[in-house]
Amino acid sequence: MHITAKTKKVGLLGWPLGHSLSPAMHNAAFAVSGLDYVYLPLSTPPDLLPQAVAGIKALGFVGVNVTIPHKVTIMDYLDEVDTSAKLVGAVNTIVVKEERLIGYNTDADGYIRSLEQAGIAVAGKSAVIFGAGGAARAVIAGLASANIASVTIGARDQSKADGIAQLFAGTVPVNGVAWDSNAFAAALSQTNLVVNATPLGMYPAIASQPSVHWDLLQQSVAISDLVYNPPITGFIAEGTRRGHTVVGGAGMLIEQGALAFELWTGCKADTQVMRQALLAGLEAINKN
């Protein structure tokens, strides 16, 4: 990579960034596309977020990704928020256009793209989601845009599930329940898609997984996990063992990144190259 004063800059705002693999994914995609761009990790403590946002403009960045804990707070410092981000309630991508900062959310569409890549269609179907955080909200937004018929959110705390259900009132029928309830078990027995939108199964606590009553699921049910480290979680492995179609979290990470790439450059990203960079990075992390 040959970086000059003409190289266009993008990056990632978050705190802490730790072992973020977004720089590896995007820089690999820039290189194979022949684009003179560089993607930089920009560790930003919460109390310095306003200065970081001003710095994006001052330093001539084309745009940035945004990750925890800034996805919601960042909205206060933007000139415009796209409808994609308004629906999810968070921004994960910023484009700098004529010195204006425009916020988008590519998680929802990225999730649907990952399902499509696996041959899973959701129009007219039903889904059950474990978890009631920001990830679940992005998944529901994506499913609603893809014309899902109904969604059931299961959470340890039903009030959190109810809260998210209310946010989507008028877009798609969403029911919030406790994940140890009879209502949740009934939803599992009738669903077409089960999604883990919790951190359960994430490295290093790889032994944990959502408490699914597997025998309730029909054989045709698709299993989706948003966790991407490890690439094959216990949840995905069990779904595979039982003969279900499965989609790991790497797909969503790659596809949301590819959509951000397109917003910044106007070009399609090579998602295969991004996948190779992601998997190589995960392998290196898990060896250490």
Image (spheres, rainbow, N blue to C red):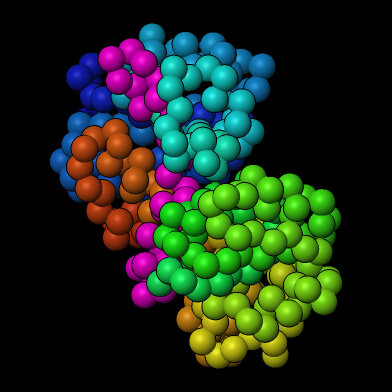
Q: Residue at x 26, y 25 (%)?
A: 8
- Is 132 displayed left or right of 275 in the figure? right
Residue 230 seen from this side = no
Residues drawn in magenta: 95-120
Quadrant for the N terminus, please: top left
How far across and how far down the image is residue 124, in percent? 46, 71
Quadrant for the C terminus, please: bottom right
Q: Residue at x 57, y 50 (%)?
A: 170
- Is 170 displayed left or right of 105 in the figure? right
Nearer-the-camera pick, 119 or 247? 119
Locate residue 152: give its quadrant: bottom right
Locate residue 48: give its quadrant: top right
- Is 114 displayed left or right of 261 in the figure? right
Q: Is residue 203 above or below residue 233?
A: above
Nearer-the-camera pick, 239 or 175? 175
Nearer-the-camera pick, 69 or 222? 222
Q: Residue at x 40, y 25 (%)?
A: 102
Q: Is residue 111 magenta?
A: yes
How far across and how far down the image is residue 153, in percent? 69, 61
Nearer-the-camera pick, 183 or 15? 183
- Is 163 displayed left or right of 137 in the figure? right
